[in-house]
Amino acid sequence: MLRERIQASNYSFLDKLRSIDYLLILLIIAIGSISVFAIYSTEGGKFSFYTKNHIIRLTVFFSLFLVLSFVRVSTWYKNAYLFYIVGLTLLITVLFFGISASGATRWINLYFLNLQPSELMKIAVIICFARYYHRIQSSDIQSYKFLIQPIILLIIPCYLVIQQPDLGTSILIAGSGIAIIWLAGLNIKYFVYSGLLLLVSLPFVISLLKPYQKSRILTFFNPDRDPLGAGYQIIQSKIAIGSGGFFGKGYLKGTQSYLEFLPEKHTDFIFTLFSEEFGFLGSIILLLLYILLIYRIINVGLVSRSFFAKLYCFGFATAIFLYVFVNIAMVLGMLPIVGAPLPIMSYGGSSLLSIMLGLSIVMSCKIYNQEQISVY
Amino acid sequence: MLNRGRNIEKGRVITRRMFILAAAKILLFAGISSRLYNLQISDREKYEILSDKNRIREWKTPPQRGIILDNFNKVLASNDRVFQLHLILDEINDFDATIFKIKNLIGLDQFQVKKLYKKKERLKPWDTLVVSDNLTWEQFSKINLYLHELEGAKPVLSTSRFYPYANDLVHIVGYVGDASPKDLEKPEIKENFVPGLKVGKYGIENSQEKMLIGNYGIKRYEVNASGKRISQIDYIKERQGQKVNLTIDIEIQKYAQELLKGKAGSICAMDIYTGEVVAMASSPTYDPNKFTHGINQKDWQEIRNNPLKPLINKSIAGLYSPGSTFKPLVALAALEYGILDPNKTIRCKGHKHPYELYGVKYHCWKKEGHGYMKLRNAIKQSCDIYFYEMARLLGVDKLSIIAKRYGLGTNVLGDLYNDEKKGLVPDTKWKRRALEQSWYLGETVINGIGQGYIQTTPLQLCLMTAQIANGGYKIKPHIIKDESINYKDVINKIKLDQSNFPLHERNYLDDINVEYYQRMYHKKSNINFVLDAMFGSTNEQYGTSYKSRYDDPKYQFAGKTGTSQVRRITDLDRELDLDTEQIEYKKRDHALYIAFAPYKDPRYAISVIIEHGGSGSKAAAPIASKLIKRIIDRHKLREQFNNGNISLA
């Protein structure tokens, strides 16, 4: 009975509203609100450009999220490859028509927004891989034939993004893709072997890096190497966070950011500002919100019937985790400085758009969680 | 069914892998949390300090220098209001344009502009550049008029050292200037230094730095990453340096300098009981105000190349043979050691029959000779022959004991002036050590008339005179007021202690150390004999300074002339017997005079030296005479003021 009803896909609108994960929406609103306060603080407590823009974007993209949540999950499934191809096309467009800022060519001018296709690619890879592994029999997964295809699909965007150059996003794209390959059940030995291979080829990889990337990595191991140059950001970030103490310096009272010692405080270093003003307590609470968010996404995957939805949700949860982890570990001086925004918190349209898009697919998985997706 | 079973298996794999991944995520989040704990809780203090270091920057504010006053609290060195122009560097966008505008407004030359650029290079971007620390009112008002066009320019009312008596005091008070790296090694400067602070370069300004420099203030500002001041957090006010009171009477000092005008020389005047230096003039002199803001090349060359050497403080750094001014001391030594009866008669036969020792001839200054001389007359008329013989009998070592005891051969003002010279009181030991030669009797003979190796400073001669005039008591000469000594008691004690009997516990003929305000003589009568002879020298006919005397007992003084040779006098010179004016300046004798006054109840000692002035009686004694009158005229006022009976504004 149920199955028939599902196959008929005759959910009533009430059913749909009932299956919405309201806790997830609450979490998004919570983190979004915190981000508005944080960005307001980066402007020294003045309601101006960044704050205004951020609020507009949050509102627009959140509405978009709500609307897209009602798109059937099978529709996402059907258009998964198309999504990937569009993303790739945009990446290639960047190569030729991209606009540059601070030595990197990452954006396409869409007039209302400078779109960063690499951000969209983060989601595209997940949805594309989820579809790919959805239809593969578990017995075929280990075969080289089915392994080589996703690897190619992964290497192309990663290569294009590295060329921009944007090492951080490239690593995050690769990370999300690898996460899905892992989830699909590829034998552990492959991961071990490729891990070892990466370790061995590391010196070679480093020699391919741009000078500024090398310097960032060297600086990571010794920030005092160049305290006013490459090491400046990480030293100042640590000072800001450390001086926050348990309760923080208080809202709008973060001297490090207020007095402009912090670089890129409204984008990659937004956590530093937050942590300086709200201390250990605030940081842990924000971290808990992200953990809850990830947990809710995983939960959607667990209650979904289709492999596509499961793979997508688990994959997207892992991606969110990666973004959060890489960003925070970076500002805490645990990882080298690579451009990686903090989801929702950081100021930046493309990043916010792709996160909201990703979340709307999660929500659609939740709403249509009983939907079975045919392999073909 | 198979398909379905496989699907179930696939679902399980996915879920299992998800849980493994979730475990890894929890682990990594735990890692982040522990890192946060480390930074924000364990190491919080460290980062708080670093954060404060980041945001708080200190600016030191210069203190005002302590003022220097004379005996009557007249200001000798003050802090005058000056107009300055500062540039706040971080408020300037186009430094070149700003400098160009300022250059045209206040008329800087190319050299000064270059200097500013050099100065700027050494500063940090948030520092202040002092364009000029001494603008004229005209320049200052011009700057204020065009202030809106000058970004970062700040007209500042500040203070800088000013010496109202300029030339009259430079050798005593000294002057200030920018601190050199060597100055910065001194702890009192190092601890209190602020960029731009002027420090003492010479004299009281230099030696009393600790008192005068004061303590800087601190302004703490919150600054942003580019060093721009955001708000003032804290201001610890600077403290002005302490005042320094000198014993100098500026009126007398001024007069002394005036008397020396156009001459090279020195005048020292001292209170014979308290040891207070009332005046200490040195000529020629120069303007210390020129040094405050850095002296220009032209002025500097002028001072440096002056053949009369204005930079040398002749009172304490000029070394002269005392000549006949040494004779009272030689006589005193001879009497103390009982070498000769003052009634012993020696005949001075003039140049035709000079004093002879081992075939060497020693002449008296008087060509025709003095005839039969007793000791008192020999002092009064300054007969060299008498003193040759007396010195020979006395011996140089005994003479040196007395000479040193009365203040020769040692610094008079301690370490107050770093250029004060010790002079030289020779004895046999000294010659063996310094020149590795044995002493010749002939050297003793010329030592007896204050020539030869002996070298003294004018202030030493003044001290010597003072210590004979006060009855043979050791005093502590000083130029900075010493409030710790009750001089009324000291004066009373010395005046009442007129015992003429040798004390048995100490032998005053040995080379002993005498404490301050204690007797130095062996027999009082010997001192009185010398004082009486000096009275004769000035107030009796045939006395060498008879012409400069006062008959009024209020001003009546006693003294001794001296004419110190700067070269050996040849037989040819004796034949020519030229007047002073006929001799080349550099070869003329130095004129000296020592005196004390008033004779009846002496209070002041004075020494005058005119370089290449000719004879002491003609060149030095008249000057001393004039100054003595002025000093005695002001004595009552000084006494009343120092006893606190009156106060002057």
Image: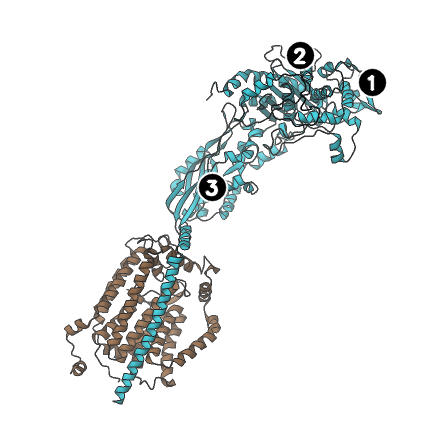
**Residue located beneath label 1 in the image:** B353
Question: Where's residue A127, x and y in %?
Answer: 30, 76
The mark lying in front, picked from 3 and 1, is: 1
Residue B558 position by quadrant? top right
Q: Position of residue A82 (x, y in %)?
A: 29, 78
Q: CA distance from mark 3 to mark 2?
A: 62 Å
Looking at the image, tell me whether mark 1 or mark 2 is earlier in sequence order: 1
Which residue position is annotated with label 2? B539
Q: Residues within 10 Å of mark 1 (few under 14, many from 20)?
A: some
Is residue A16 at least partly visible in the picture? yes
Output the letter for the chain in cyan: B
Question: Which amino acid does the dot numbered 2 rest on?
Answer: Asn
Chain that appears brown: A
Mark positioned earlier in the residue sequence (3 or 2): 3
With B538 as the anchor, is A70 left or right in this view? left
State the mark number for residue B130. Answer: 3
- Quarter holding residue A143: bottom left
Can I make out residue B364 in this image? no
Depth check, front residue: A359 or B254: A359
Question: Upstream in the sequence, badge 3 or badge 1?
Answer: 3
* Closer to us: B264 or A300: A300
Looking at the image, residue A268 lies above or below residue B302 = below
Query: Left of B376 or right of it: where is A317?
Result: left
